[in-house]
Image (cartoon, rainbow, N blue to C red):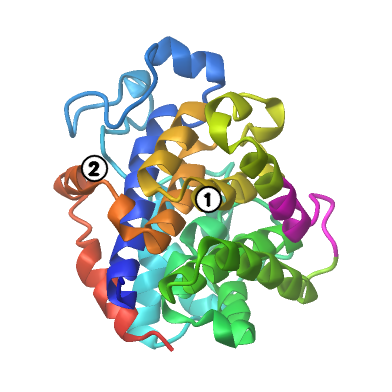
Amino acid sequence: MYTPLARSIACLKGVSTGDAIGKQTEMHHRNDVKRWYPQGLTGFHGELGTVIPRYRGRPYQWLVAETTDDTEQTIAVANTLIGHGAVSHSSIGRALMKCRKSNHPDVSLGRFQQRGDPDFVCSDGDGCGAAMRAAPIGIVYSARRILDLIEAVFQASVSTHGGQFGICAATSFAAAVSAAIDGRPPDDVLGVAVDAAHEAERYRPPSSVGNMAAALRKMYGELVSASQALPARLREDDCFPNRPAIIVPLAISLAVVTKSARETILLATNIGGDSDSVASIGGGLAGAMFPQSVDEDWYRAVESVNNHNLIELATRLAAMRQ
């Protein structure tokens, strides 16, 4: 039996390793993944700390095992919780103003920073940007006090993602992490995620993107029915993570179906699309459910390149768990 502390540490390890491994194929179509990695990805490809080949000569040259904005913003939320004992949209806004990865003007974080107002509240935005930073809320807030958890997710989301789907997706991930920290079985974790998404709908009117609870149930049903042939099923267009209604449902469903952080991360990475977010969210949840499934060699590689010290961060978050 794993303690909440062990599950919290494994969650952040899964978030960071999924993020760094998934970055190698982010925004690639499946054909491009095959072109760069003909045998598929099995972990980090290339010498740690060197430029990922596809990013050579690009404005930002991402390194092998370097984490992205997914982990940077997760750490920002974690430090805000630790420093303030809770989150508000203003405190999260101030933390996000200091984030420097993927903050160019055509993404939500860049637009938020250009406004220069940490108190700004976004009324739209249905991407996965809020979900990818929500793991610390799941560590600190119990899913048994779901309204408190949802309010914390809302406050941590609306600086950049205020649409219903964005908030509901972040809520479902945070609630799933929280249930996993309690040691609940995978079916319960999925049920908590679906119920939390329903509850979070009260914060915003319906979104044109869709309904998170329904999207999650559908994706899980599709994957569990193909659990013996997941790689083949994931090659279908309705599993390609290039839009909000797929990214977070796919990440959560992969974690619940595979019961493995390592397998979730590799499956997500070899799909392409928003692979770093799917691998990070899915890896974090699978790590919390099944701490033994986290690849410790991957985590040591991530720490050697980034020096995040996520074990200490997770320890402090777990001590705050309500």
Res 277 seen here: yes
- List the residue tagged with mark 1: 110
Q: Which residues are magenta?
A: 206-218
Q: Please name which of the two marks, 2 or 1, marks the residue nearer to the observer.
A: 2
Of 80 and 176, which appears nearest the observer? 176
Indicate yes or no whether the magenta region holds residue 209: yes
Q: Is residue 78 left or right of residue 157?
A: left
| Residue at image coords 64%, 85% | 147
Of 41 and 26, which appears nearest the observer? 41
Q: Quadrant of residue 48?
A: top left
| Residue at image coords 30%, 25% | 52
Q: Is residue 39 left or right of residue 302?
A: right
Q: Does 35 appear above or below 17?
A: above
Identify the disc placed on residue 35.
Answer: none
Res 273 seen here: no
How far across and down, in percent of the image, does residue 122 sit?
67, 65
- List the residue tagged with mark 2: 298
Count of residue discs? 2
Quadrant placement of the N terminus: bottom left
